[in-house]
Amino acid sequence: MNEIAIVILSYTRPREVKKLIELCKKINFEKIYVCVDGNIKESIQNEFLKLKKEYEDVIFYIRKDNLGIRYGITDFIEKIFENEEASIFIEEDLNLNSNSLDFLVKNLYKHAENDDISSICLFSPLSLNTKYKNESNYLTLNFFPTGWASWKNRGVELNILQNENYFTILKVLTKLFKFRIIKILFWFKRFYDYKKFKVDAWSYNHIYKNFKYNQYSIIPKNNLVTHEIFDEFSVNMFNKKIGIYNKQKLFNMEHSAIYSEFDKRKFIIETELMYSLNLRGILKKIEKKIFR
């Protein structure tokens, strides 16, 4: 029996949740949670209630109100870590297999006492570039919330950005990126938009925490997750046919250094992905010549 808890974050897809529950049972997870954000459709609510009756050994949290991604997921994360020391979090529309979950479980145990590691992620941009596949795992200061795992004592600080002033954020970014002005501006804009409630997201808190405390997320050398369904309801717009995120996610990867798991000083790769705007491409070329 697997002692690590696993959490299925859901909103509108009871059929996909049922498939994930069966996968979790097949791998013998001792504790399975299903956390459902509120849905206005009564038919969907009833489907989840049926699932709750069918799987009496699964712990269901079904919320009446819809809190959205920013508050809904953070509320569920807090609730889970009230009872669990470590946990895996997956969304209802992810395409997973036993290897995906095995990767998360093994690394949770392996790095249980390693304070340098804040989380483990299933998504990896390294799959887009076959040049960097010499090791089993890699590290990044970024965080990809498409199937992930963490610990209660050093995982997500859910309000760290909201409680931080802009001067401190700029100071953290400057210390991290030195004179790489484009990267500083890129991430400052992301964190600014989050604080101003311009984006319905929660994961920027974890990215900033990694930046501030110099912690790392583990990623695999090969991508281990895609979206089962790719539509307007997808929490993270990931296209499983071509294996990449949407443009916004590509920008995030553009500014994410990836390191060797065995030597954090050894710089492995910064994904070189094209900007959609010529101006940004020109600025990047200027930055390369001046700061590299």
Image (spheres, helix red, strand yellow):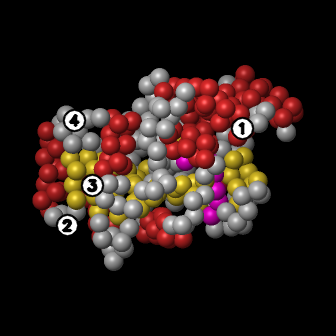
| Range covered by the magenta-colored residues | 137-143
Queried whether the magenta region covers residue 141, the answer comes back as yes
The residue singled out by tag 1 in the image is: 175
Q: Earlier in the sequence, mark 2 or mark 4?
A: 2
Q: Secondary structure at mark 2?
A: loop
Label 4 Cα crowd, 10 Å radius (few <14 / some 14-19 / many 20+): few
Q: Residue furthest right?
A: 289
Q: Is residue 128 above or below residue 45?
A: below
State the separation of the CA atoms marked 3 and 2: 11 Å
Q: Nearer the viewer, residue 228 or 202?
A: 202
Which of discs 1 and 4 lies nearer the camera? The answer is: 1
The residue singled out by tag 2 in the image is: 57
Q: Amino acid at mark 3?
A: Val
Q: Earlier in the sequence, mark 1 or mark 4?
A: 4
Q: Is residue 189 above or below residue 291?
A: above
Label 1 Cα crowd, 10 Å radius (few <14 / some 14-19 / many 20+): few
Q: Secondary structure at mark 3?
A: strand
State the separation of the CA atoms marked 1 and 3: 40 Å
Q: Earlier in the sequence, mark 3 or mark 4?
A: 3
x and y percentages locating residue 124 in the rendered image = 58, 54
Q: Residue furthest bottom?
A: 1
The residue singled out by tag 4 in the image is: 65
**Are the residues tagged 3 and 2 within 8 Å (C-beta)?**
no
Q: Amino acid at mark 4?
A: Asp
**Are the residues tagged 2 and 4 within 8 Å (C-beta)?**
no
User: Could you tell me how many numbered marks the image carries?
Assistant: 4
Q: Amino acid at mark 1?
A: Lys
Q: Nearer the viewer, residue 190 or 111?
A: 111
**Are the residues tagged 3 and 4 within 8 Å (C-beta)?**
no
